[in-house]
Amino acid sequence: HKHTYGEVEINPNKLVIEKLQILLDHYQRMRDEWRTLSYRKAVSALKKYNKPVGSYKEAIEIPGIGNRIATKIQEIIDTGNLKRVESISKSDEVIKKFSAIHGVGSKAALKWYALGYRTFDDILKNVKLTHSQKVGIECFDDLQERIPRDEVTEISKVVEDAAHSTDSKLQLFTTGSYRRGNPTCGDIDILITRNDSDGKSHSGVLPKIVENLHNRSFITHDLTHTQEDDVSGKYMGICRLPGGKYHLFTVPYGELGAALLSFTGNDIFNRSIRLLARKKKMKLNQHGLYKNIARGSGGVSLNEGKLIAQRTEQEIFDALGVPWR
Ligand code: DCP
Ligand code: MG
């Protein structure tokens, strides 16, 4: 029953899924966890269902679909539409736009909507914004655009050059969606480390690299700069090529594998591989893989465990028993 159009496979319940997905996104934005969960279950059940759902009766038989959603499915089958989708679309548009501002979460966006603000002007006039949020509004259109892969390569070269003029032994890795081979990227995630024995010889390089990039007029706006300790720092800013938002991370060389794995993602992959570690009484984070972890209620780890892998990705996969590709 799978329909194909050219190379692309069309799901037989495409319209139903589209409408339910709109409600799912809406409830997620509204932070309605309960509804979000039921809609997510329903959408994922429908994505796996390989014939067109013809009725309420058929829908309710599918595990993951309950009475309320089955009723909605019947409405879509009958009318090609959902009244609920139409009624939320106006408020949704505004809240979606507000939460798309860099540094604005769904909570603030909802609050501003509730206070009656509808435009960026309303916000600029009435809300005390953080520096990041102001930049987010100023650069809004540029930041909405995804960055073509070639530009990410070009931008990475500039950052690499700046890093090397600070210290020629620094190593840089462009991670995130770029490292996964995506044709466009939402931002640029660059890890910086230095091959040494104590994992500390890169301390203090981040501010120097940022200064160097400022001197080249490459950075147009700073967003955030935090230094966790002397070896782990994070800088975020916007650079000269339109829409070029980037992250620089410094990490100890000994943790490179764990850091590369974590910053390459994607986020779903990270969640599932960390869950796998957890099932093996281990813990995986951006610093390494630890074994013999005891967990209390709610899954919080009660001890540090024993560090078993962090230098290379392959070591970590081996220790987890997952084939490394
Ligand atoms: N990450 C994560 N969990 C999150 C956010 C990020 O594990 N909630 C990890 C995996 C991501 C990486 O950090 O791949 C970089 O985060 P980005 O938000 O930059 O995501 P991507 O680079 O994957 O995509 P985009 O092209 O949108 O930047
Ligand atoms: Mg990214």
Image (spheres, rainbow, N blue to C red):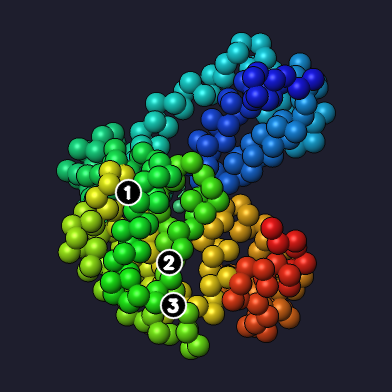
Q: Which residue is mark 3?
A: 194
Residue 227 makes an appearance in the image: no
Determine whether, in the image, residue 250 is placed left or right of residue 295: left
Q: Which image quadrant is residue 118 in?
A: top left
Tell me the distance, in whole angstroms, between the alpha carbons under discs 2 and 3.
9 Å
Q: Is residue 154 above or below residue 115?
A: below
Q: Which mark is residue 244?
A: 1
What x and y, as percent, mark residue 295? 70, 75
What x and y, as percent, mark residue 10? 67, 23
**Mark 3 or 1, nearer chain start:** 3
Give the residue at x 47% y 79%: 195
Q: Residues within 10 Å of mark 1 (few under 14, many from 20)?
A: many
Residue 178 makes an appearance in the image: yes
Q: Quadrant of the N terminus?
A: top right
Viewer-proximal residue among 304 and 270: 270
Query: In the image, is the residue at mark 3 within 8 Å of ligand 1 by its beta carbon?
Result: no
Query: In the image, is the residue at mark 2 within 8 Å of ligand 2 by its beta carbon?
Result: no
Q: Secondary structure at mark 1?
A: strand
Viewer-proximal residue among 238 and 62: 238
Q: Which mark is residue 15?
A: none
Q: Are marks 2 and 1 in contact (CB under 8 Å)?
A: no
Give the residue at x 50% y 88%: 197
Q: Nearer the viewer, mark 2 or mark 1?
A: 2
What x and y, as percent, mark residue 213? 24, 63
Q: Which image quadrant is residue 190 in?
A: bottom left
Tell me the distance, in whole angstroms, between the alpha carbons under discs 3 and 1.
25 Å
- Disc 3 marks which amino acid? Arg
